Amino acid sequence: MSCATVVAVRRAPQHDARRIVCRSDTWEFLRDLGQTFGWHPRGTTYVTSARQNPSAPEPIRHNYQPGGMHDSKRIEAADATEWASALQVAKRSPYFSGMMRAHIGLGRSSEQSLLNILDEFIQFAHDGAFVFSLCAEAELPTIA
């Protein structure tokens, strides 16, 4: 994988879609498309390997830019499902095909491959919380 690849992982056995891989420009398109159609991002948190102290303060919220292998971020369940719902609204919009063509014109994706990634991401995000980073699939922690 190139370092322009975003990997989102959920390693919970109750979910079928456990991994999404896309180029970083497609990740940004999914983020922007969701925001355009009503998603209000709540922010991500960095994944920590140590157990959190229950009395610890609320984690600081961050953006949706993927970090490197050791800077994985977590999207909470409600945020992920709201993002997926906004993407479903986008697909029904009369402006959707124009937005897709504009993105395709900037990158190397075909319309069908972008639609496939969009559909996979919608299903994946509807299942809830996940972690993501650049080129870091093997390093991402398990989400239960």
Image: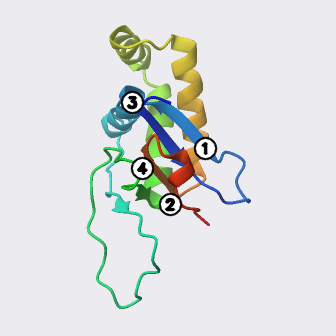
Report which residue position mark 3 lands on. Answer: 4
Residue at 47% over, 60% down: 78
Q: Is 72 displayed left or right of 35 in the figure?
A: right
Q: Earlier in the sequence, mark 3 or mark 2?
A: 3
Q: 67 or 90, which lies in front?
A: 67
Q: How far apart, in angstroms, are the residues tagged by discs 1 and 2?
A: 15 Å
Q: Report x, y in % for residue 96.
A: 42, 20
- Say which of marks 1 and 2 sits in front: 1
Type of the residue with mark 4: Met
Which colour style is shown?
Answer: rainbow
Q: Earlier in the sequence, mark 4 or mark 3?
A: 3
Q: Quadrant of residue 103?
A: top left
Q: Report x, y in % for residue 119.
A: 58, 31
Q: How far apart, in angstroms, are the residues tagged by discs 3 and 2?
A: 25 Å
Q: Which mark is residue 77?
A: 2
Q: Determine the secondary structure under disc 2.
A: helix
Report which residue position mark 4 lands on. Answer: 69
Type of the residue with mark 3: Ala
Q: How far apart, in angstroms, are the residues tagged by discs 1 and 3?
A: 16 Å
Report which residue position mark 1 lands on. Answer: 19
